[in-house]
Amino acid sequence: MTLDLLPIGKTARIVSVDWSRLVDEEAHRLRALGVDEGARIAVSSRGVFGGRDPLAIAIGRMTVAVRRVHAAAMQVEEI
């Protein structure tokens, strides 16, 4: 399943990321924040308008906002 489909509050591990789907600067920023293979992650909330962008994801003690297109590039498995 991709991260954009993970239910709110469920914890998952990032299995793979298709970095080629992201702009280099965006990929670098996400990696710097710890969003990479093996990281434990959870969706905290979703936006309320139209495409429900952005997603708030919890990684470690941080909450990071990511666009749905970024989340769709990440394969996760529930833990």
Image: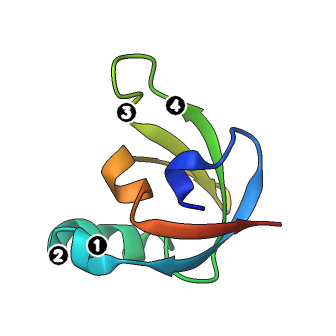
Inter-mark Cα distance, 4 to 1:
21 Å
Q: Name the residue that disc number 2 marks.
A: 24
Q: Which residue is drawn at 42% across and 57% down?
A: 72
Secondary structure beneath label 2? helix
Amino acid tagged 4:
Arg
Label 2 near label 1: C-beta < 8 Å? yes
Disc 3: CA contacts within 10 A as few (<14), some (14-19) or many (>=20)? some
Q: What residue type is labelled 2?
A: Asp
Which of disc 3 and disc 2 is earlier in sequence?
Answer: 2
Going 57% across and 47% down the picture, which residue do you hit?
5
Instruction: Report the residue marked by disc 3.
Output: 53
Residue under label 1, please give it: 27
Q: Residue furthest top?
A: 49
Q: Which residue is drawn at 38% across and 45% down?
A: 68
In the displayed structure, 78 sits above or below 58; it is below
Closer to the N terminus: mark 2 or mark 4? 2
Q: Are marks 3 and 4 in contact (CB under 8 Å)?
A: yes
20 lies above or below 79: below
- Residue that badge 4 annotates: 46
Q: Which SS class for mark 3? A: loop
